[in-house]
Image (cartoon, rainbow, N blue to C red):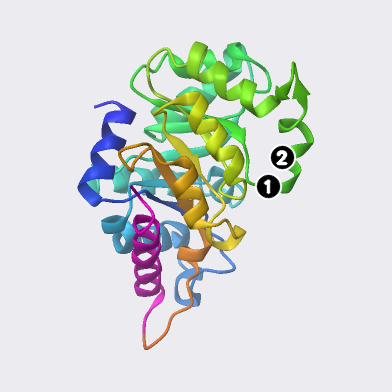
Amino acid sequence: MTFTEKLSAAWKTHDSLLCVGLDPDLVKIPEELQEQPDAIFAFCKEIVDATAEFACAFKPQIAYFSALGAEDQLGAICAYIREQHPHLPIILDAKRGDIGATAEQYAREAFERYGADAVTVNPYMGFDSIAPYLEWKGRGVIVLCRTSNPGGSDLQFLMVDGKPLYQHVAQMVAEKWNRNGQCGLVVGATFPAELAEVRKIVGNMPLLVPGIGAQGGDVQASVEAGQTEDGFGMMINSSRAILYAKARNGEDFSQAARRVAMDTRDAINSYRN
């Protein structure tokens, strides 16, 4: 099953556009887990099991693992998701951007070492930095387009031939790079007007949409701007707001995460077509 087939099935099976980001911070995870040698894996496992019912995908951010020398735990949580929740795609958030043989190794890292269904990449170095990922014909390649951070405008909003650079990226990916039909774009929820412009350019291409939750993106504006006509087409990511949800009424951290994931899924669905 290809990335887009798996994603489409997850959208429909779970009636959800919510992507749960896995950004484990050793300082923020529960104290009872911090002293365990596999603390990162143990925390992520609880989050995955608690939220899988409400998710269309999981998105582990590689930096949170590699900064702690926990790549083995990243591999373990990816394997766990494939074994226990095989219908949910894994998007490795790596934002890689290099050329030639180096890009080939990054592709192997994402798809072979971690078994990800898709990976995020940076298009700044052009098509030859993307081509090695496209050799993995059933895997997703999600290209940075209009990112959720304020500084993204420094380059992405530069005018080139009468339109901003991010629109050139969207058009290039949709018309030239999407050879396998497995490409997607990263477009932040913090810029719903640009999200709507990207949707016009790329048709039904999947959009990974970070920026709700802790970053303050507007759920209603994002859904209305980015959904496809059938009410799908988006992976709306929430990480910290779910991972570190404030427990109440005797909840533990995983129950709190489950509650916030369900509430977020329902809030998203209330604005879908």
In the image, taking residue 202 as reference, residue 188 lies left or right, namely right
Tell which of 26 and 118 is nearer to you.
Answer: 118
Tell which of 131 and 71 is nearer to you.
Answer: 131
Among the 4 quarters of the image, the one containing residue 269: bottom left
Q: Amino acid at mark 2?
A: Gly
Determine which of the numbered discs, if any, sits on residue 192 in the image.
none
Up-down relation of residue 141 to residue 127 (above or below): below
Up-down relation of residue 176 to residue 173 (above or below): above
Among the 4 quarters of the image, the one containing residue 117: top left
Q: Are marks 1 and 2 in contact (CB under 8 Å)?
A: yes
256 in the magenta segment: yes
Tell which of 203 and 48 is nearer to you.
Answer: 203
* Extreme residue in the bottom direction: 249
In the image, taking residue 55 as reference, residue 94 lies left or right, namely right
Q: Secondary structure at mark 1?
A: loop
The residue carrying mark 2 is 152
The magenta segment = 251-273
Which residue is painted at 53% across and 25% down in the image?
A: 106
**Where in the figure is residue 30, as x and y percent of width and height?**
48, 74
The residue carrying mark 1 is 149
* Residue 260 in view: yes
**Where in the figure is residue 237, as x and y percent of width and height?**
47, 50
Q: Secondary structure at mark 2?
A: helix
Dot 1: few (<14), some (14–19), or many (≥20) neighbours within 10 Å?
some
Which residue is painted at 39% across and 74% down in the image?
A: 256
Q: Amino acid at mark 1?
A: Asn
Up-down relation of residue 158 to residue 77 (above or below): above
Which residue is painted at 59% across and 52% down in the image?
A: 68
